[in-house]
Image: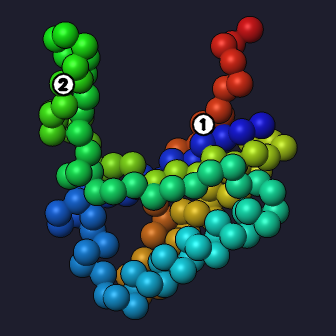
Amino acid sequence: MKFILMMHAPRGTGDYGVVQWSQDDFKAHIQFMKDFNAELRKSGELVSAEGLAPPGQARVVRAGKGGAPDVTDGPFAESKEFLAGWWIVDVASPEQAYAIAGRASAAPGPGGKPLNLAIEVREVMGGPPP
């Protein structure tokens, strides 16, 4: 069973609150993510994982006239959080995906304290529902 684990981060100064972290805290967070992904890759559970650029760099695209895409810098849905990155894992049960999401949520933040970020877990459907 494949699941997507979507990490949501609170909006901070600029787009990312991490710009206010110390360099040591930021490096510890990135090292945690590298080690976490390496562990999931070694166990065979990791399908894909990526972090995303700040929301300020995102664009909204709609079908435009004449087939050309209409690209704008918004409007976006108002929210207090944004999608910061994701993992796609292939595991035997939803509970296994929840356990992985819980570990990702505990990524270290300022002072090494767990961030406890919200991780949305959704099954990746292999086809339309029966």
Q: Give the residue at mark 2.
A: 70
Q: Is residue 57 left or right of residue 24?
A: left
Q: Amino acid at mark 1?
A: Arg
Residue 57: assigned label: none
- The x, y position of residue 68, in whole percent, is 22, 19
- The x, y position of residue 16, in whole percent, is 27, 64
Q: CB under 8 Å between callouts 1 and 2? A: no
Tell me what residue is drawn at x 39 percent, y 55 percent.
52
Q: Which of the 4 quarters of the picture holds residue 31?
A: bottom right
State which mark lies toward you, 1 or 2. 2
Q: Secondary structure at mark 1?
A: strand
Q: Quadrant of the N terminus?
A: top right
Tell me what residue is drawn at x 64 percent, y 66 percent.
37
* Front in this rendered view, residue 54 or 21: 54
Q: Is residue 53 left or right of residue 4?
A: left
Rendered position, 48 above or below 32: above
Rendered position, 75 above or below 17: above
Residue 122: assigned label: 1
Q: Is residue 38 left or right of residue 93?
A: left
Q: CA distance from mark 1 to mark 2?
A: 30 Å
Q: Amino acid at mark 2?
A: Asp
Tell me what residue is drawn at x 28 percent, y 57 percent.
54
